[in-house]
Image (cartoon, grey):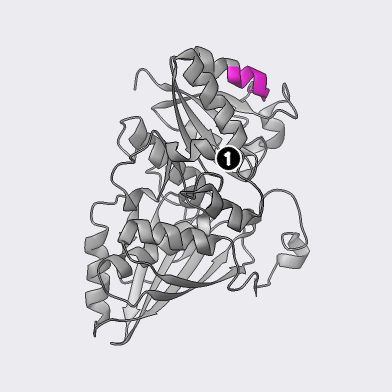
Amino acid sequence: MTNRVPTIVLGGTGYVAGELLRLIAGHPGLELKAILSDSQPGEPVSKAFPHLAPAYPQLQYSSLEQVTQLIATLPKSAVLAAAPHGVSHKLLDGLIKASEAAGTDCTVVDISADYRYSTASAYEAVYKHAHGAPARIKDFTCAVPEHLAKAPTRHVAHPGCFATSILLSSVPLLKLGIAEPRLFASAITGSTGAGRTPTAGTHHPQRHSDLYAYNPLAHRHAPEVTELAHAASGIQADFCFVPHSGPFARGIHATIQATALKPISTAELVQALRDFYKHSPFVRVGNEMPRIKDVATSNYAHISAVADGKTVAVMCAIDNLTKGAAGGAVQWMNRLLGFDEALGLLTPAPGWN
């Protein structure tokens, strides 16, 4: 592909930033121009991501000043932002302002939580601090790609990884009138979902061969899921969410249960989900129960479901770093740039990772 779009990654040494770099390395329409780390400009990126050294042997981190100048000089650019929550809002606002002042064409997909909510008050209620750029919120739309054919705004925010798995499972139940709007979600995530900085919950001897719930019925993704499910389905639902930490590095397995509005069989439920996602290249609905090994490191979501006449259960497996973050963001960027949404994302999971 000629005329590849110059691409800038924000996020330093984080796992999602590394996953963005991996995906861009194999993307025929994106050309990496810089990755921001204002704390270590000039340092080799391969020091933080040795597995990416063959793809980026000479790449060094850029400072915020260098990235800002680049945004202002590139006629067209794509920004994939994996900066931390509470940092991304001001950072992106400044870069977009620099682009606007220079008259350049900059398209942003943010993976942090900073532009997922439609109002500053909703964001502040969850994250307990003021939004750094409330006037910029109107320029972002948040949704999983499968639930919004075209973004009404110039820029997009990608939902969280837990939110992605729950939304893919639950929105069809609500929009198709299959289930009551009170849903019970249980999801298990790998250790990469906790970020790169070690904590007691991610330290290997503590997490290995262990499984435990955390923040039950109080996780910050629940309000996000509620707002985005309403936007996608038109139904105001109540989500009862219990997240778990699993003893693996990558992946999320989610189970959503609800009471059926009318009797439905397993075959009917699976077919309804299959029809709902028939135009979604990365959602595969089948009769076999989803397994994390079948999706890890890929942008695919595997979904299946069962029903006993009165209760429905939908299971979904995704990779938290790919479909739940970097891959979903690239999928959105493909759309915003006019590419096929699957460009550069069709590599299947290895299966034995």
Q: Measuring 50% from the left and 20% from the top, which residue is drawn there?
A: 99
Report the front residue among 151 and 202.
151
Q: State left or right for residue 292 relative to residue 343.
A: right
Report the front residue among 117 and 194.
117
Q: Measuring 33% from the left and 53% from the top, which residue is drawn there?
A: 147
Residue under numbered circle 1: 82
Quick one: quadrant of the C terminus? bottom right
Q: State left or right for residue 70 relative to residue 178.
A: right
x, y percent for residue 156: 43, 40
**In the displayed structure, would residue 170 be above or below residue 325?**
below
Q: Quadrant of residue 177?
A: bottom left
The answer to whether residue 293 shows anywhere in this view is: no
Q: Measuring 60% from the left and 44% from the top, which residue is drawn there?
A: 131
Q: Residues within 10 Å of mark 1 (few under 14, many from 20)?
A: many
**Is 269 included in the stretch rendered in magenta?**
no
**In the displayed structure, would residue 240 be above or below residue 341?**
below
**Is 66 included in the stretch rendered in magenta?**
yes
Q: Quadrant of residue 329?
A: top left
x, y percent for residue 309: 28, 87
Quick one: quadrant of the N terminus? top left
Magenta range is: 59-68
Report the front residue among 333 and 130.
130
Mark 1: which amino acid?
Ala
x, y percent for residue 318: 46, 58
Q: State left or right for residue 105 relative to residue 11.
A: left
**In the displayed structure, would residue 216 be above or below residue 337?**
below
Which secondary structure lies at badge 1?
A: loop
The answer to whether residue 349 shows anywhere in this view is: yes
**In the displayed structure, would residue 88 be above or below residue 172?**
above
Q: Measuring 72% from the left and 59% from the top, which residue is drawn there?
A: 202
x, y percent for residue 352: 51, 57
Q: State left or right for residue 252 relative to residue 341.
A: right
